Amino acid sequence: MMADEPGTLRIELLTPIDHADRVIVWDVYENMEAVEAHRTGELLRKFICEAGDILLSVTGVRHLCIE
């Protein structure tokens, strides 16, 4: 999956302890261009289409990495 989206540095799938019926996807990108490529790309579109029946919401929060 990461190889299909240049600029993707990390993808984590997390399940909150208090909400086992939810999944959080944590993506880390090299730059804003990579974020936009993901948001407008085929991989995300295909995922939303195929998982549409089980998706209740899709939201995003942008963060800055402090090193």
Image (cartoon, rainbow, N blue to C red):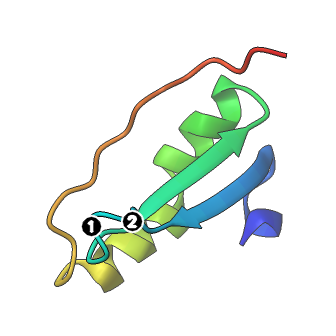
Above or below, comparing residue 45 to residue 38 in the picture? below
* 20 lies left or right of 38: left
| Residue 13 x %, y % | 56, 67
| Residue 44 x %, y % | 47, 63
> Residue farthest to the front?
18
Above or below, comparing residue 64 to residue 37 in the picture? above
Above or below, comparing residue 11 to residue 53 in the picture? above
| Residue 18 x %, y % | 29, 63
* Mark 1 residue crowding within 10 angstroms, few (<14) / some (14–19) / many (20+): few
Q: Nearer the viewer, residue 27 or 2?
A: 27
* Mark 2 residue crowding within 10 angstroms, few (<14) / some (14–19) / many (20+): few
The residue at which mark 2 appears reads as 17
What residue is drawn where x is 69% and y is 42%? 28
> Tag 1: residue type?
His
Q: Nearer the viewer, residue 13 or 54?
A: 13
Q: CA distance from mark 2 to mark 1?
A: 6 Å
The secondary structure type at the circle numbered 2 is loop
Q: Nearer the viewer, residue 16 or 55?
A: 16
Q: Nearer the viewer, residue 22 or 64?
A: 22
Query: Residue 19 bears which disc, if any?
Result: 1
Asked if labels 1 and 2 touch by Cβ distance under 8 angstroms, the answer is yes
* 40 lies left or right of 37: left
